[in-house]
Image (spheres, coloured by chain):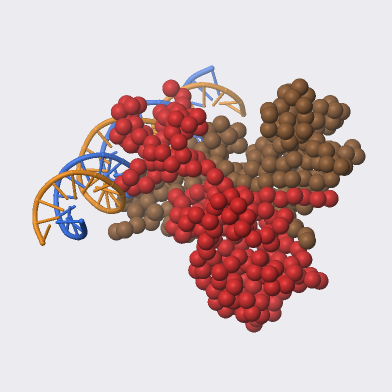
Chain colours: A red, B brown, C blue, D orange
Amino acid sequence: MSTPLHITISEQLRHQIEVGDYQPGEKLPSEHQLMDAFSVSRITVRQAIANLVNQGLANAQRGRGVFVTPQQKVDYSLSSPLVFLAEDLAHKGITLTFKNLSFRKVLPPKAVQRSLQLDSKASVYFQKKLLLMDGATGAIDMSYILLELGQKYASQLKHQMTFPTLEANGVVINHIDAVIECTHADYEMAGQLEVPLGQPLIVYRYTAYIEPDQPILQGQTISRADRFCYSLSTKR
Amino acid sequence: MSTPLHITISEQLRHQIEVGDYQPGEKLPSEHQLMDAFSVSRITVRQAIANLVNQGLANAQRGRGVFVTPQQKVDYSLSSPLVFLAEDLAHKGITLTFKNLSFRKVLPPKAVQRSLQLDSKASVYFQKKLLLMDGATGAIDMSYILLELGQKYASQLKHQMTFPTLEANGVVINHIDAVIECTHADYEMAGQLEVPLGQPLIVYRYTAYIEPDQPILQGQTISRADRFCYSLSTKR
DNA sequence: ATTACCGTCTTGTTATATCAGGTTCAGGAA
DNA sequence: TTCCTGAACCTGATATAACAAGACGGTAAT
């Protein structure tokens, strides 16, 4: 027996999920039922379920059961990030809501100072927003914006996404430098985004510039990899 | 005690890794040592280590021990994907090697037929390449390319990346539509990319066009999220 | 009718135990 | 000196067991 039992079990369940034996949102058999069905111990069954959770195929809810995770991703277009994501999603029947977690004047960390080309005493506004799609957590955006802009558009920034707010107020963003990478949810992030520890998160790190080459905004959007993807078009 | 022991342990180890008590590549204490140190059972220690592995902080090697995973990512620029990645990496002292896993004429799946605007009987070339960075697995690229191009540049395509090969032969790519998303390694992918089951992978799905609006290439690069990131510049 | 409580089901945490199968290295055989 | 082998150590797989704690539904009390 070269392949472990827990792999055999999780692979079979995975197959059943993929062919639709278990529908998205449906409850999988309980640990006891699986123990009986496969004649294995609870540890083995739990390992198999952990495999599914780690693959993003299922999510366990204490006291309730293990459920098939629906696989639907929201597409965020990087080619036109200024488009109102909310409206874009509304077309697909998804409601986007915000929760302003923080909006305050701070002294930015050194790295931000550098990329925003600030002198060491300059304050900026720090904003942290939680993005909910149909009420479910989707992403957290944390960014630093030049003091004057933050001050001027404070009320709007608290209720809208940053790019559209700037755009709507005539702040023309010339270009955005960005890096996309993927990390894991640490204990803290896992709690905030309501995912199991270690689940993949997409980090979109950006710096936005206006007119000549003046950086005005720097931040990162940390999104749940099971609910977000990014699209782009590279032109020559 | 509201937070579980395994979380307490993994969080402490995580902290020690982050402050450098354990250096990248260094071996963590063995399970038995951790059992003694924290006065817990082996199951608890193993759960704690699983937490670290799931967070991409450590990797376990049977018979050898658990080691701190080095966190160094290769940056792939999407704004100029035609640049020779190999040369780009060479500047950073990283050697890029290839392994051609497959190169053959096939009838493409329906989705590819559509995006390459082919009629249902047209064959294309399918290529599958394994990308190694300093000998370590980094990514797998699978793509479908128009029959004539595949045939013409077969020998080069087997040893180089696709975009630079086309570019070097005067095939001018006009634009690339792409989507970036993040998935989990299933059992098969985990084996090919040498990561634990469920580790995050970045999927770069692309369609490349020439001249008027003629698609010539469609594929996806599946890369290890712990070793890859993508950078881009969005211009207005 | 509404609320409170309790039993049952379910997952989470943790301990103890055993065998399997890699890795490493020292010591002995060739 | 080289090679083989076995002890010691390490992680992986799996069983059994017990208690904790969240969810849920039914029943009894208000």
What residue is rendered at 61% in x and 58% in y?
A87
Residue A222 position by quadrant: bottom right
Q: Is residue B38 above or below residue A98?
A: above
Looking at this view, is B48 or B153 the one in front?
Answer: B153
What residue is rendered at 30% in x and 28% in y?
A36
Q: Locate the C terminus of chain B by quadrant.
A: bottom right
Q: Is residue A224 left or right of residue A1?
A: right
Residue B135 position by quadrant: top right
What residue is rendered at 75% in x and 69% in y?
A172
Residue B71 shows in the view = no
Residue at the far bottom in the pictured view: A121
Q: Position of residue A121 (x, y in %)?
A: 64, 82
Looking at this view, is A52 or B56 the one in front?
Answer: A52
Counting labels gives 0
Q: Is residue A69 above or below residue A148?
A: above
Q: Is residue A135 above or below residue C29?
A: below
Q: Is residue C8 left or right of residue B191?
A: left
What residue is rendered at 69% in x and 55% in y?
A78
Residue at the far right in the pictured view: B170
Q: Is residue A105 left or right of residue A217?
A: left
Q: Position of residue A136 (x, y in %)?
A: 48, 54
Residue A235 shows in the view = yes
Q: Position of residue A160 (x, y in %)?
A: 59, 67
Q: Locate the N terminus of chain B by quadrant.
A: bottom left
Q: Position of residue A28 (x, y in %)?
A: 38, 36
